[in-house]
Image (tube, helix red, strand yellow):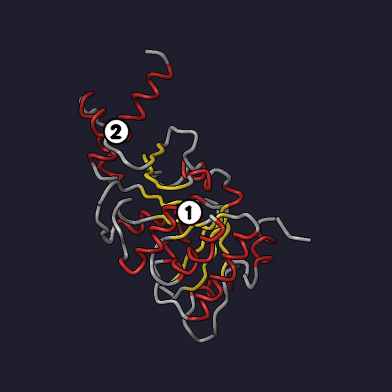
Amino acid sequence: MDETENKIRVRKIIIALSLIHKGDWQKIMHAVQHHEVPKHNVVEELVAGLKCGVTTIIDKDYPEGLRHAHKPPFALYYYGNISLLQEESKVISYVGARMASDYGAQMAKKLCEGMAQKGYTVASGLAIGIDKAAGEAALPYGKAVAVLGNGIDYVYPSENAVLQSEIKEKGLLISEYPGDTQPTPDKFPMRNRIIAGVGRAVVVGEAYQHSGTLITVSFALDMGRDVLAVPFRGDEGSACNLLIKEGAPLVENVDDILNCLGKVQI
């Protein structure tokens, strides 16, 4: 078996293990460590049954920023334009609260639309609130990426069904969980490491202290990503204001993000 054939075989085994264990990183790693290789016919049948795109950690189109992340996904399932994640320096991640204020949503739309207009990809989750505002703003420019905390074919939350469908067609829908794997609380922190890892920087659009958004911030800092924050009103328990106090660049407009990226527009 030559090198190319061996790589194809290994790739199929990775995908098969991911499908068998429904994207559960710990279970896949256990199978790899214990050399639990599915039978050839099982591997071929599972891979042939895929209806979405898939990239594995050994593939060239796998997002480079994730290769050295905490527990890098073995396989990523997707619909849409995977090339949106190929140039990490042109990707920002925009995250924030589900219970977004009008101000937070307006800032998300303003900043994400502005970055998309300048050719930047905007990655976020697909939650209600800030995530939804970010996705809707970048979508008309074909620059919206939604990272799911459930199976790639599972619609969640139901309020964002239309947006999920539109990003699938015009942007990039991506998940380490295959098929109709249902969302559970443990999957969202795992999703957050992907959001943090695919971009050059993470912009926190709105969050409160003890917010789950800070999990993404923690992953981003561990990966050496820049973390920026949109300021909020005082006396509101804002995690954004706390991040700014601790040294995160303050973001009021698109040029503030570009300045942090070293791409100031003249």
Q: Residues within 10 Å of mark 1 (few under 14, many from 20)?
A: some
Reply above or below: 22 against 183: above
Task: From the top left corner, tell me how far across and down residue 262 is, in percent.
Answer: 70, 55
Q: Which residue is mark 1?
A: 170
Q: In the picture provided, is 180 more to the left or to the right than 226?
A: left
Q: In the picture provided, is 238 more to the left or to the right than 251?
A: left
Q: Specify the amino acid type for callout 1.
A: Lys
Name the one closer to the observer, 199 or 43: 43
Q: In the picture provided, is 246 more to the left or to the right than 32?
A: right
Task: From the top left corner, tell me how far across and down residue 137 is, in percent.
Answer: 53, 66
State the residue at coordinates (62%, 65%): 114
Residue 186 sits in which quadrant?
A: bottom left
Q: Looking at the image, can residue 32 be seen? A: no
Q: In the picture provided, is 75 more to the left or to the right than 226?
A: left
Q: Quadrant of the N terminus?
A: top left
* Disc 1 versus disc 2: nearer the observer: 1
Which of the labelled discs sits on residue 115, or is there none?
none
User: How many callouts does the rendering have?
Assistant: 2
Reply above or below: 100 against 262: below
Q: Which residue is mark 2?
A: 47
Q: Specify the amino acid type for callout 2.
A: Val
Extreme residue toward the top, this view = 1
Task: From the top left corner, tell me how far across and down residue 252 is, in percent.
Answer: 63, 73
Query: Which structural element holds mark 1?
Result: helix
State the residue at coordinates (49%, 43%): 63
